[in-house]
Image (cartoon, rainbow, N blue to C red):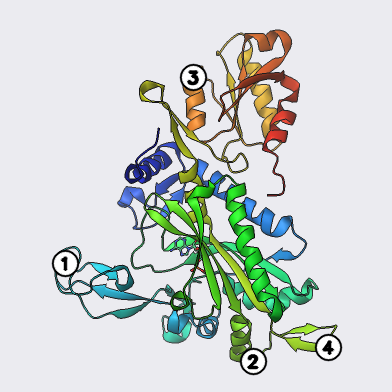
Amino acid sequence: MAVPSQDLMSTIVSLCKRRGFIFQSSEIYGGLNSCWDYGPLGVELKRNVKEAWWRSMVTNRRDIVGIDASILMHPKVWEASGHLAGFTDPLVDCKACKSRFRADHLDNLDKCPKCGGQLTEIRKFNLMFKTFMGPVEDQSATVFMRPETAQGIFVNFLNVQQSSRLKPPFGIAQIGKSFRNEITPGNFTYRTREFEQMEMEFFVPPTEDEQWYDYWKEQRLNWYKNHGIKSDNLRMREHGKDELAHYAKACADIEYKFPFGWSELEGIANRTDFDLKRHSEASGKSLAFFDEESKSHYFPYVVEPAAGADRATLAFLVDSYDVEGEGKDARTVLRLHPSLSPIKAAVLPLVKRDGMPEMAEKIYKELLDNSIKSFYDHTAAIGRRYARQDEVGTPFCITIDSQSLEDQTVTIRERDSREQFRVAAASVVETVSKKIKVKSL
Ligand code: GAP
């Protein structure tokens, strides 16, 4: 049964709250606009998304290493990168109702879209959050919360390259929080003021930038598909010249068909040698790479796939959401890729007696001891228990019934097909491990 797209977002938001994926931040105080907290299931899902990204970008590759840079950086970083002068959105206010809009999101700048009142002139609004380092709140103590993780990679380029003895083409990856004082956050976790990025800067010889740009566009699109997002809901949109950021020679967005329309999920940019050159000029310390073969220095070009962990998590939630059947027979299923599911297996004794709980407890312990995130549930009828697991995307339910006590076998029920098969109780860990095993995706 298809859920109308206008209802889908509110259905997902309420599922997220009810089942402990995502809560509004500081809810008991009325909430803080655009800030969200991940609950027990949400944190598992988002961690799995980040781990899937890290595996495919760092662990499974010989040419990419990771870092974890600090959020606060020297203020000169943001001067050199162009963020202090140029990381702005055009802002207009309504003089009558005081509503605030991004001018580039309005078709008509003559009147307020809410009340028809007069709008102010466009002002440039810098999106960086400011704070002070140390006890004195003056200009010399001003620091910024990073608006992208990328700059932590650029300023560490030579530290990483020399300590790891790498030679272009190679990449440096990072996952971490970024902050932007967005004028119009919204659409749940899609646009927030505090969010997590998954960025990788791939440093290449200047003559190879275009081929690597094409390579990363394809790789990144496939990553979403391989982790279960439907191809029809993904597209690549190349930026027009007028849309390009100040540092980019080319840029493409991977867009996802969210219930509120096609929107950016990830950007892949050819940043040229802009950042390494700017930091070299501003710091007085050259970040040029010394090529042993030609015995000369050069500034590598950079191809950057920049994704959002929160946006990707939201896309996986929306894409996997499905309602099968109608009326009282309807079942809600999150058809998440097993590698992303917050819980991999639920252990369910059919009844709470006759030795079934004891046998179930033993299997549950074995799963946990093997680092397979599992859940034990002996409450309610078995159908209700299956439904609860389907709704949060658990790929396997293991049921212990009266036959289990006789022949030491259990049933494994698969979430998507609802098919059940029997296996020896002693082989549950092995069977589930095989099924959730992450191949190189
Ligand atoms: N270093 C390049 C860069 O930061 P971006 O397109 O501004 O590029 C990359 O950001 C990704 O970060 C976006 O595609 C999106 O997934 C995520 N992102 C950016 N702003 C966000 C926000 N306000 N809320 C949630 N995610 C955001």
Q: CA distance from mark 2 to mark 4?
A: 22 Å
Q: CA distance from mark 2 to mark 3?
A: 68 Å
Give the quadrant of the N terminus: top left
| Left or right: 162 as drawn, with respect to 252 | right
Task: Tell me which numbered mark, 3 or 1, is placed earlier along the sequence.
Answer: 1
Task: Tell me which numbered mark, 2 or 3, is placed earlier along the sequence.
Answer: 2
Q: CA distance from mark 3 to mark 1?
A: 52 Å
Amino acid type, mark 3: Gly
Q: Residues within 10 Å of mark 2 (few under 14, many from 20)?
A: few
Instruction: Tell me the residue that label 4 is attached to.
Output: 295
Q: CA distance from mark 1 to mark 2?
A: 49 Å
Disc ID at residue 97:
1
Residue 360: image quadrant is top right
Instruction: Tell me the residue that label 3 is attached to.
Output: 383
Residue at horizontal 73 percent and vertical 70 percent from the top = 170
Residue at horizontal 62 percent and vertical 60 percent from the top = 218
Q: CA distance from mark 4 to mark 3?
A: 70 Å
SS state under label 3:
helix
Which dot, 1 or 2, sits closer to the camera?
Answer: 1
